[in-house]
Every structure is written in structure tokens, then in C-alpha cells.
Image (cartoon, coloured by chain):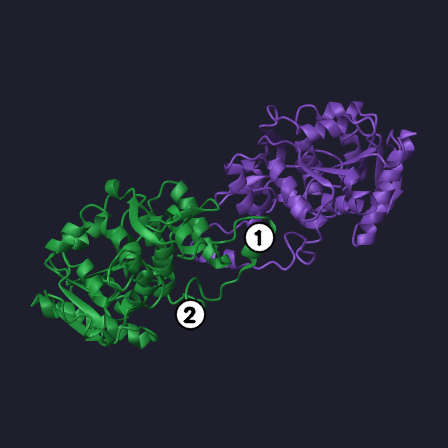
Chain colours: A purple, B green
């Protein structure tokens, strides 16, 4: 096993996609498989929407909207304005170009194609050489038990802007969901170099993947080393409700908490240099680095750091 | 029955909508009911599309795209470009704003609302004071027997650009379709002033309406006078395949043919001044006028002419 073996990345949306892009740029592209969370997929306006998969599609193909921080570059909003005029639901913003992804996915799902086959076709059409996989072709839906009752993910995340206090999460359908065969094969590949847990929200982006039967065990027993990059820098999340949720779930809001959360399968952890003290008590190898990814160079550098950390602990 | 009674217009798409707009502008708006052809409705990309109803919505609300001759003003095309990139079907052009109408209609149909209730809500949101009705809430689909075999309407009309030679037409579902109750009530209203058959294609725009059981009899027995405006000027159709189809169906391509085609229920016919000779042999009252509608004034003038013609024969 050299440093040319396959690499598996687990990713949620925007934050995870940044590191996934870094990995994609520094690795021979056909050695990278990215498994995306589909727990925040949902049906809206009759359309099947897969936010994390689409963020990865747009990010890896260089089409992500850098100004907005989500969606597609060069996006227009004529649909949304017209929908509002018709009294349609407008709390979830769908750009005109983004809508094509949803309409075409919905049409192909209705025709009986599995999500993974559709995404595999989409990523080829977007000239993405890496594999991009949903964790499962079966439906898994993240739900949150909050002080406003049980909420569907996008109700919590977008409509209510993460304001409700979260008590616990559930991943409806996960018990019966089957891992995608290529995900199983990649996890079982004796040549697998590393599994990279991207700096996504552990509770809503990574946990849904871990909830599919077989993933956690495979990670525990993998001969490849499992490296996670901290989504927490200096006690804060770069984006999204990670820190708020940690507090609500009774976890210390620091970089070490995330490593402990993954401890049963984690081999090495990459935390930010500012969190040297916070992670000093961890009982696993830790690599300190600058983990805030602003430039493309930052993404590539952090990807190199994560892979080097994985390579080191495997030897 | 004065000249303030209700008026019923039967219309297809672009050509019919021009006269419908003229009627809308000269009548007290709440006296006008427009019944639209739904025979060219279809399902595309998983969306329920009603081209003639939508053309009427956009035309009556002043949102029609005057440059294109179809669709919405201020339209953008980001969806279509993105869909092509994903390998989706692109032969039917869907603008970004237009798409909102289809997505919202499809969602509400799936939720169990009848098409008529959805369109009634849409026209109110577009500030259209006239009633706008599909001929039926039941599905009727125009199909064409051609030298390329049986074709669905939009396959013939858009994808194949009306190129196949038409032998006959069928309106699948029409036998079992039920007229909308408000259409029945308007037809039966003793105060009904006139029924205006707009200058739409008789075979693909008006015939599907006439094919729904009850319409033709109601028109024959209506106390209101039925006036049709010729869609043929000087042996040519202003737009679309009307003249080509007349020829293929073995009818003389002139204004008189259309009057004869409607003869069993028609009380008076409005033809263009250039067709004086062509219509001279007709055995019903004919009013000659300038029927080419270029300006808004043309639409209003022709609407006044049609109503005056109807009023005259009723006395």
C-alpha cells in the first residue's frame, strides 16, 4: 500500500465539499470516492432535492457560487420570483439553473433509476473524474427532536434557520437502508489508503452516513486509517449550527469533542493550531494545521495534511 | 337581454388569446368567461403543462412575451441551459418564470386540486378579473394520425414542427370527459349575450373543446348567438399549421371552409375584408372586417366587431 491507493471521503455540504475539492485537486482523480450524506434530501414542490450531493457536484465542477456560499455560479432567480407571485412556497430558495438538477433527478427517479446512477451520470456530464456516491439509494431522512417538536431537516435548517433547540436526532429509514455496493467495495478494498471524514457537522452530515448499517463497523475494522478534520476552530463552527448543536446536545464546544464523538473508528485527528490546548488531552494522534479554508490553496494544503496524517498512522 | 350580458369565448393559444384580450379590454371584466382548450396539455419532465391556459394567463395579465410571440415577458433561460448540460430533453423550451407555473400546478394537481381551481387561483393572483376555465377537469389529449403514425400533440406540434402530414385527429379521453360545471352554467345562462369562437385553429384548438360531450349541442341550442372569427386571411393562417392542416384534411384552404366547419352551431361569421369573394357563397350572415391583430387597438376593434355581429343576429 503506497500513497497511490484509493481514498474515501465522507462529506456533507458546503464545509465538507471544500476539503473534498482539495482532495480532488491533489489526488489522481480516479482514486477518489466521495460518499455524500443524503439525510437532508427532501421532497419540495414535488421535486426530489439532494442538497449535499448537489453541493459536491457544483463544487467539484467549479460551478459553485462563491459569493453566496451555496448554489451555482451565474445563477438567476426568475423561477423563485414567479413562484412567489403564484403563492407557492418560497422559503427554500431554488435558483433557475439548480432547478434543472432537481427536475431532471426527479424525472429519472420516477422512471425507476437509482439516485446513485443519476448522480454518476450527472458527475460525468459535469466532467468530474472522482466517484460521487450517495451513502445509500434507500431513503434516509434526518429528523430533529426540538423544543418545537419533531422537525424534518429542512424545516429546521432552512425554514426555521436552526433556531429550535435540538434534543436528539433520528435518521428515519436508516435501519433498513442498504449501503451502496460501491461504498461497501471501497471500504473493503485492501488497497484503501485512507478514509477522510470531512469537516462537516458531525450530527447532521456525518451521523446519517454512520447510521446506515455496516458503515461504523467497516470503519472500525478498516485497514486504512481513518482521519477526521475538525469542523470546530477555536470553539466555533466556520459555518452552520455545529457549535450550537453541540451545546444543546450537552457536549463541550471544542475541537476535542468531535474527535471523541468519532473515537470508536478514528485513527488520527486534524485540528486547528489555535486548538492546541483543547486537543492536548486526546488519546489519539493529533496533527495541528491551519484548517480554515478560504482559498483554493488552503483546500489543497489541508487535503495534503489530512492524507499525510493518515499515511503516517498507517505505517 | 341587453349588451351587458355574459360573454363566453372559446380559445386556443396565441391567436385566440389575442381576441380574448380584446374582449377582456372592452367588456366589464366580470362578464367574460374564457374557456380554454386543454387538448394540448401534456406531461413533460414530470411537469403538467397547459400551454393554452398559460398563454391566456400571460396574455390577459399583460405578461406575454411580445418579441417571442409566446411565453412570458422578461423571461430568462438558465434552467434550459442547465438541463441541456445534464442531458435532459430540451426540445420543449421552458423559460425560468414559466416553469414556476408548471411546478406549482403540478404540485397542486398531485395534492388533489382540480385544474380549474388552480387556474382560478392563478388568474386571481395575476389580477385577471375575467373567468378562465379549462374546458374540463378531466384529461383530454389531442393525438394526430399522420404519415409518421399516431403522434401526441406536442410531439407533432413542437418536436416535429408540424411537419408530418395529418390524416385525422383524435381527442383521447373526450368521451368520458365532463364539462366544467361553470362552463355548463354559462352555456345555459338565459342572459348569455354571445359565444365567441376565437380565431384559433379549428382542428387542434376548438375541436377538442367541441369534442367534450354536451358542448356542441349546447352551442346549437343556445339562445345566445354564436360568432366565429376566421383564423384564415387570404387563404393563409396568421400563425401555425391551420392552412397546412386544412389542405391535408381535404378542405379548401379559405375563410369559408372554417365557417362551414362550424356551420351546425354558428350564427354569424366574421371574415377578413380580403376574403369578400371567398365567403360570398356562405348561407349565414357574414361581417367583413380587418381581422389581422397587430396592435392592442386591433384586438379591441375586432372584439367590438365580433360582439356587434352577434348582437345583430340575435335581434
Name the residue at 40% across, 45% down.
Answer: B108
Q: Which mark is residue B66?
A: 2
Q: Is residue A259 left or right of residue A161?
A: right
The foreground one among A66 and A155 is: A66
Disc 1: host chain: B
The foreground one among B279 and A285 is: B279
The foreground one among B282 and B74 is: B282
Give the image location of residue B220, x and y in percent: 12, 55
Helix or strand or loop: what does disc 2 sit on?
loop
Q: Earlier in the sequence, mark 1 or mark 2?
A: 2
Name the residue at 36% across, 40% down.
Answer: B112
Give the image location of residue A255, x and y in percent: 80, 39
Name the residue at 85% across, 48% down.
Answer: A301
Is B89 rendered above or below residue A37? below
Helix or strand or loop: what does disc 1 sit on?
helix
Q: Is residue B181 left or right of residue B90?
A: left
Is B215 rendered above or below residue A174? below
Judge depth for marks 1 and 2 and give the one in front.
Answer: 1
Q: State the residue position of label 1.
A: B84
Q: Which residue is at the far left?
A: B315
Amino acid at each position: 500500500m503506497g500513497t497511490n491507493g484509493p481514498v474515501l471521503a465522507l462529506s456533507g455540504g458546503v464545509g465538507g465539499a471544500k476539503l473534498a475539492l482539495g482532495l480532488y485537486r491533489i489526488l489522481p482523480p480516479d482514486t477518489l470516492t466521495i460518499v455524500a450524506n443524503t439525510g437532508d434530501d427532501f421532497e419540495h414542490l414535488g421535486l426530489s432535492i439532494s442538497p449535499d450531493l448537489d453541493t459536491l457536484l457544483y463544487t467539484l465542477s467549479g460551478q459553485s457560487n462563491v459569493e453566496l456560499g451555496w448554489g451555482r455560479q451565474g445563477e438567476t432567480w426568475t423561477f423563485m420570483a414567479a413562484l412567489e407571485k403564484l403563492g407557492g412556497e418560497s422559503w427554500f430558495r431554488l435558483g433557475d439553473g439548480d432547478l434543472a438538477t432537481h427536475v431532471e433527478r426527479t424525472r429519472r427517479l420516477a422512471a425507476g433509476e437509482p439516485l446513485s446512477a443519476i448522480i454518476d451520470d450527472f458527475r460525468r456530464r459535469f466532467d468530474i473524474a472522482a466517484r460521487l456516491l450517495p451513502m445509500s439509494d434507500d431513503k434516509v431522512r434526518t429528523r430533529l427532536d426540538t423544543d418545537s417538536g419533531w422537525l424534518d431537516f429542512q424545516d429546521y435548517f432552512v425554514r426555521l434557520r436552526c433556531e429550535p433547540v435540538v434534543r436528539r436526532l433520528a435518521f428515519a429509514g436508516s435501519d433498513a437502508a442498504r449501503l451502496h455496493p460501491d461504498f461497501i467495495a471501497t471500504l473493503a478494498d485492501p488497497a484503501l489508503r485512507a478514509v477522510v471524514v470531512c469537516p462537516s457537522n458531525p450530527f447532521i452530515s456525518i451521523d446519517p452516513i454512520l447510521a446506515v448499517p455496516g458503515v461504523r463497523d467497516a470503519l472500525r475494522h478498516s485497514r486504512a486509517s481513518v482521519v477526521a478534520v475538525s469542523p470546530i476552530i477555536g470553539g466555533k463552527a466556520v459555518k452552520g449550527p455545529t457549535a450550537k448543536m453541540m451545546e444543546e446536545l450537552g457536549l463541550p464546544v471544542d475541537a476535542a469533542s468531535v474527535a471523541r464523538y468519532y473515537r470508536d473508528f478514528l485513527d488520527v485527528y486534524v485540528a486547528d493550531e489555535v486548538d492546541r490546548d483543547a486537543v492536548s488531552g486526546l488519546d489519539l494522534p493529533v496533527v495541528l494545521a491551519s484548517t480554515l479554508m478560504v482559498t483554493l490553496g488552503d483546500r489543497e494544503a489541508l487535503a495534503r495534511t489530512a492524507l499525510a496524517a493518515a499515511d503516517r498512522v498507517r505505517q
